[in-house]
Image (cartoon, coloured by chain):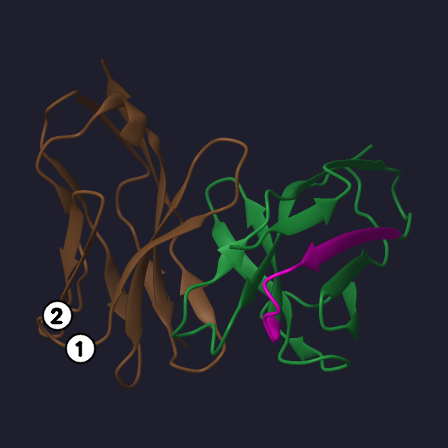
Amino acid sequence: GDSVTQTEGQVALSEEDFLTIHCNYSASGYPALFWYVQYPGEGPQFLFRASRDKEKGSSRGFEATYDKGTTSFHLRKASVQESDSAVYYCALGDMGYKLTFGTGTSLLVDP
Amino acid sequence: GGIITQTPKFLIGQEGQKLTLKCQQNFNHDTMYWYRQDSGKGLRLIYYSITENDLQKGDLSEGYDASREKKSSFSLTVTSAQKNEMAVFLCASSLGLGGWAEQFFGPGTRLTVL
């Protein structure tokens, strides 16, 4: 079945550092790829989506590029802020009703 | 805009107890979801519903029942709570296909079983 792998369970950075959170997927067909962000005490929020090879999704300074060749959708941000501290989830959509989530990456940014 | 409300916010139960969690949305979305969130395991789909009175099993449906009697509400029942179980249950809704469209999440119900 479909699966999403996030290799980093936790990432600790200082403000203005460059962020990369890795996401690789396994799926039959051509899935949609998502990033969601979850702040403490809240449900996840949609960040952005990409649905075709080489498409870049972006929002709030975060971006990721759909790469069918390496089956990846890595999240990047050039300069993180303390307010970016949250849990980030990569997810794969089957273009139907189902979304498969990765295990999440907890980002902690020191001021 | 809209909002998803989940009740209760915290739920403490006893082993073997039947427990019900409720979710309401005012987006007028057709599709609603229940997910279970465990530390280190991400979100796993329990049930979803594409319209009133429809129920579809997710990957983790064993041990749960669901009910969608109105378009705006979706309930989840833990049929027999397991001792020492701790998890967050998240309700979500989407306008169209949730594997394509943005899903909107509620704040969650935190379950503890003693």
The amino acid type found where label 1 is placed reads Arg
Residue A3 screen position, x and y as percent: 36, 67
Front residue of A103 and A97: A97
Q: Where is residue B54 in the image (x, y as percent from the top left)?
A: 72, 82
Q: How far apart are marks 2 and 1 (CA)?
A: 6 Å
Return the residue at label 2. Answer: A55
The single residue placed furthest to the top in the displayed view is A111
On screen, residue A19 versus residue B61, left or right, reads left
What is the secondary structure assignment of the residue under circle 2? loop
The letter of the green chain is B
Chain letter belonging to callout 1: A
Instruction: Report whether B22 appears left or right of A26.
Output: right
**Helix, strand or loop: magenta stretch:** strand
User: As displayed, is residue B101 above or below residue B40?
Assistant: below
User: Please, what is the three-letter code of the amino acid marked with disc 2?
Assistant: Glu
The answer to whether residue A35 of the structure is visible from this angle is: yes
**Residue at 52% in and 38% down:** A42
Query: Residue A66: image x %, image y %?
Result: 15, 67
Question: What segment is highlighted magenta in the picture?
Answer: B19-31
Q: Mark 1 points at which residue?
A: A52
Chain of the residue under the numbered disc 2 shown in the image: A
Label 1 Cα neighbours within 10 Å, binned few <14 / some 14-19 / many ≥20? some
Based on the picture, tell me whether residue A71 belongs to the magenta stretch.
no
Q: How crowded is mark 2: few (under 14 residues within 10 Å), some or many (20 or more)?
A: few
Residue at image location 17% in from the left, 69% down from the top: A71
Q: Colour of chain A?
A: brown
For label 1, the SS is loop
Q: Based on the picture, tell me whether residue B20 belongs to the magenta stretch.
A: yes
